[in-house]
Amino acid sequence: MSRLLENMNPQQQEGIQAVDGPVLLLAGAGSGKTRVITHRIAYLIEERGVSPDSILAVTFTNKAAKEMGERVEKILGHNTLAQPLLCTFHSYCVRLLRRDIESLRVNG
């Protein structure tokens, strides 16, 4: 068993290992959703060989994004310069608009 699945209940293990398509994690406060998400990111990188810089995780608050980033870094260690993008919906949209604003212009 992968170290990323240790100390997880069956539902959490399922959330971590479900990597073919989108996954909805629906659970109450304190049930381990952030833990599952961070371990899923690490699982994708370590067990499935996904490049860290091809992973995007968005959340609602800067605090949550920062905490997820710290947790992923702690799980993975400092073994790569490439990092997943963990940010808020707002910061991601601003990044996208700044990068692609010219291609979004409409002739009017």
Image (cartoon, helix red, strand yellow):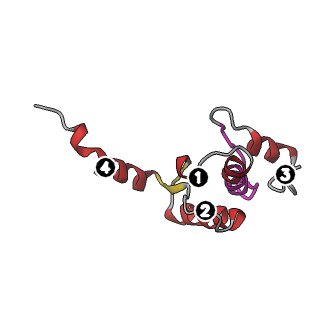
Q: Gap in Å between the C-alphas at discs 4 and 3? A: 38 Å
Magenta stretch bounds: 23-40
| Residue 105 position within the rendered picture, expressed as x and y whole percent measured from the top left | 19, 38
Which amino acid type corresponds to the residue marked 4 in the rendered image? Arg
Instruction: Name the outermost residue toward the left.
Output: 108
Q: Which mark is residue 2?
A: 3
Please tell me whether residue 29 belongs to the stretch shown in magenta. yes
Query: Nearer the N terminus, badge 4 or badge 3?
Result: 3
Residue linked to disc 4: 99
What's under tag 1, amino acid-wise? Pro
Separation (CA) of disc 1 from disc 2: 9 Å
Residue carrying label 2: 80
Label 3: how many Cα within 10 Å (few below 14, some 14–19, many 20+):
few
Does label 3 or label 2 sit earlier along the sequence?
3
For the residues labelled 1 and 2, say whether their Cβ atoms are less than 8 Å apart: yes
Pointers 3 and 1 in contact (C-beta within 8 Å): no
Q: Tag 1's secondary structure?
A: helix
Please tell me which of labels 4 and 1 falls first in the chain.
1
Q: Position of residue 76 (x, y in %)?
A: 69, 62
Q: Secondary structure at mark 3?
A: loop
Mark 3 vs mark 2, CA separation in Å: 20 Å
Q: Which residue does the image show at 60% across and 62% down from the upper left?
A: 80
Tell us which disc is closer to us: 2 or 4.
2
Q: Residue at x 79, y 41 (%)?
A: 14
The residue identified by callout 1 is 52
- Could you tell which of marks 2 and 4 lies nearer the N-terminus? 2
* Viewer-nearest residue: 82 or 65: 82
Image location (x, y in percent) of residue 59:
53, 53
103 relative to 95 in the view: left or right: left
